[in-house]
Image (cartoon, rainbow, N blue to C red):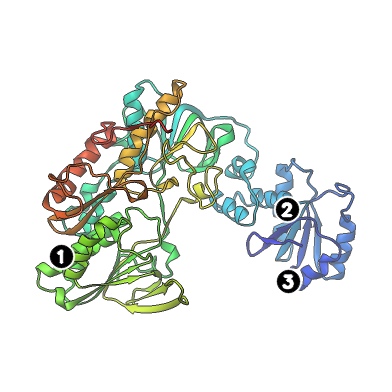
């Protein structure tokens, strides 16, 4: 018997035998639902036999037979009523368990989020892609087809989405393009480090989404519920259907604040802050200014995350402020990094270590933040050093800057577009999906092994735009992405280590070394970060002007 838990009330399984019923009772089940019609297979017991065994074991039994491939709305409603009426927990079964899982999914559609249903079914080993449109439609079979159709649909109106839309329109001005994003505000997230360091005002990093959507591009203000790539369709919340000829997926990452126990209860107070949220970056700066002594912690979760250097940027700017105010010797600084290195590209580590020593930072590797009590000013870290037993330690703090664990959004992880780890599965050079040839992805959500930064998206957008345009013209890919990413590490107010690198940690500097040595902390790199990058972002990247971002031509390989 292979009983797979869907939730606390239901498990599903393939066909059970009469002898399994007593074991179900012993395992704590109180009811059984049969979803397999009698006589479907030569070796299956009848429902009457199962029911008799169930009654003998003190279980209730219900018969809701469904023909394979024909899960009708009425059957889902009957399943929902049975789940309401029967004692829990319940085991439902059919030949493989799929019909039972499908009936549960459809019956739950009116009261659960689509992503939650897909996630629970997937965790039990059942793929609900074939009924996702019905789930999004409240469990009922839709009678419509497509609400809208476009040449290109872009999922996500962040840095990557708007940049690739603008680059596409610059190449093909008559292309019918739509961006799907429910957000009203667009944020320049790289600026939040500067807000937390007292350099920028938070308001300077935000603009209305409507002011940034490229001219001629449709903006559909709705969230995506699911994908039907075999049907060239995206399902929106409310079961609206948008069809496409080509799809570009770039919704960004999910910040999983709830994965750290107690964190959501204390963010923004009790000295707990994060520059990864617009409304908290200003609180970071307030805490830095108010702190005169004590312990300040800075955390970094397991990779991948947005801008791997951001956790320590906040630390450097805070420490520099305390140094300039003569308070550094009164403050104990701890950097708790879930990884085993300070920075993933070795060429930049020596200069960063000079600042670690200057600010007397205590480096703690393999330290992953798992819980926090803001009122008690205590954080707990799981320490998983190689070849040592995992242990948990408690560390007191007066201020803590937290970087949340990060994953692909739920609707991506449970979609047919995702790889086994939950990221959109693309060719790392062309950024085209490995399975679905009319789908591309860029930005933080795809699985190419590059740094997840706005600078990476700035280089990826022209690559995708050029390749989509080539595909429309019936040609092969013409551009490829080399993994470029940039991380301006703000090591002190007025100086930046401009880390620029590609796949495999290869250094990819934008400027000659005599002008700007990226392996050193320089004033010129600071001016680039403070004065030049924001207008390049707003006025070039988001408008299809590819300054310092021209796509690389596909290389001929021997």
Which residue is under mark 1?
320
**Quarter of image, res 395:** bottom left
Q: For the residue carrying disc 2, how many other residues have a C-alpha within 10 Å: few (<14), some (14-19), or many (20+)?
A: many
What is the x, y in percent for residue 69?
74, 41
Where's residue 52, x and y in %? Answer: 89, 64
209 horizontally vs 96: left or right? left
Check residue 419 in the rendering and tell me which mark sits there, or answer none.
Answer: none
Task: Give the side of residue 391 with respect to residue 451, left or right.
Answer: right
Q: Earlier in the sequence, mark 1 or mark 2?
A: 2
How far, Cα to Cα, is label 1 from label 2?
60 Å
Looking at marks 3 and 2 on the same chain, the residue that comes earlier in the sequence is marked by 3
Give neighbour class at mark 1: few <14, some 14-19, many 20+ (Cα, 10 Å). Answer: many
* Residue located at (16% from left, 69% from top): 358
- Residue 305 in sight in this render: yes
Q: Quadrant of the N terminus?
A: bottom right
Q: Which residue is mark 3?
A: 28
**Secondary structure under badge 1?**
helix
Give how far apart the Cα atoms at labels 1 and 3 are: 60 Å
Q: Residue at x 54, y 51 (%)?
A: 420
The vertical placement of 286 against 437, above or below, is below
Q: Nearer the viewer, mark 1 or mark 2?
A: 1
Task: Check disc 2 and report the residue beneath it.
Answer: 97
Q: Residue at x 70, y 66 (%)?
A: 89
Q: How many marks?
A: 3
Q: Position of residue 6 (x, y in %)?
A: 64, 59
Q: Do labels 3 and 2 touch, CB within 8 Å? A: no
Residue 341 screen position, x and y as percent: 33, 64
Q: Is residue 401 left or right of residue 490?
A: right
Q: Is residue 284 visible?
A: no
Q: Nearer the viewer, mark 3 or mark 2?
A: 2
- Residues 364 and 291: in front is 364
Q: In the rendered image of this protein, does residue 413 appear above or below residue 351?
A: above
């Amino acid at each position: 018997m292979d009983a797979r838990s869907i939730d606390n009330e239901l498990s599903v399984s393939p066909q059970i035998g009469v002898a399994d019923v007593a074991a179900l009772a012993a395992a704590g089940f109180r009811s059984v639902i049969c979803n397999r019609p009698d006589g479907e297979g030569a070796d299956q017991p009848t429902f009457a036999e199962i029911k008799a065994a169930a009654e003998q074991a003190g279980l209730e039994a219900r018969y809701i037979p469904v023909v394979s491939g024909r899960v009708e709305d009425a059957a889902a409603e009957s399943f929902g009523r049975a789940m309401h009426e029967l004692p829990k927990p319940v085991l439902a079964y059919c030949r493989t368990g799929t019909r039972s899982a499908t009936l549960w999914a459809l019956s739950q559609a009116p009261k659960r989020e689509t992503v939650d249903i897909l996630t629970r079914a997937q965790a039990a080993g059942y793929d609900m892609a074939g009924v996702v449109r019905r789930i999004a439609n409240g469990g009922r079979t839709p009678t419509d087809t497509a609400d809208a159709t476009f040449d290109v649909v872009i999922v996500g109106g962040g840095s990557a989405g708007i940049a690739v839309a603008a680059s596409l329109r610059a190449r093909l001005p008559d292309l019918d393009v739509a961006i799907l994003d429910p957000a009203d505000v667009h944020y320049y997230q790289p600026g939040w480090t500067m807000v937390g360091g007292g350099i920028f005002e938070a308001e300077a990093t935000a603009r209305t989404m409507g002011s940034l959507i490229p001219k001629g591009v449709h903006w559909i203000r709705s969230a995506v519920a699911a994908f039907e790539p075999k049907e060239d369709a995206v399902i929106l919340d409310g079961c609206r259907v948008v069809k496409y000829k080509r799809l570009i997926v770039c919704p960004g990452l999910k910040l999983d604040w709830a994965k750290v126990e107690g964190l959501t209860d204390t963010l923004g107070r009790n000295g707990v802050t994060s520059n990864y949220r617009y409304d908290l970056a200003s609180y970071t700066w307030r805490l830095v200014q108010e702190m005169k002594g004590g312990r300040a912690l800075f955390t970094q979760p397991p990779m991948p995350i947005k801008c791997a250097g951001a956790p320590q940027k906040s630390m450097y700017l805070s420490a520099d402020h305390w140094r300039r105010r003569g308070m550094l010797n009164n403050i104990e600084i701890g950097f708790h990094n879930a990884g085993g290195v300070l920075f993933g590209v070795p060429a930049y580590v020596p200069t960063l270590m000079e600042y670690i020593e200057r600010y007397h930072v205590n480096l703690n590797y393999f330290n992953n933040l798992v819980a926090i009590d803001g009122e008690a000013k205590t954080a707990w870290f799981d320490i998983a050093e190689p070849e040592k037993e995992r242990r948990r330690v408690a560390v007191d703090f007066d201020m803590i800057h937290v970087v949340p664990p990060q994953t692909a959004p739920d609707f991506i992880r449970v979609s047919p577009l995702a790889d086994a780890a939950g990221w959109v599965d693309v060719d790392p050079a062309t950024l085209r999906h490995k399975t679905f040839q009319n789908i591309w992805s860029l930005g933080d959500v795809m699985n190419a092994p590059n740094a997840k930064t706005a600078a990476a998206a700035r280089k990826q957008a022209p690559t995708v735009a050029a390749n989509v345009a080539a595909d429309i013209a019936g040609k092969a890919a013409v551009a490829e992405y080399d993994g470029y990413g940039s991380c301006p590490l703000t090591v002190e107010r007025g100086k930046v280590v401009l880390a620029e690198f590609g796949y495999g940690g290869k250094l990819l500097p934008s400027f000659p070394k005599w002008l700007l040595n990226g392996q050193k902390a320089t004033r010129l790199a600071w001016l680039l970060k403070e004065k030049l990058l924001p207008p390049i972002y707003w006025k070039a990247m988001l408008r299809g002007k590819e300054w310092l971002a021209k796509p690389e031509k596909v290389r001929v390989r021997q």
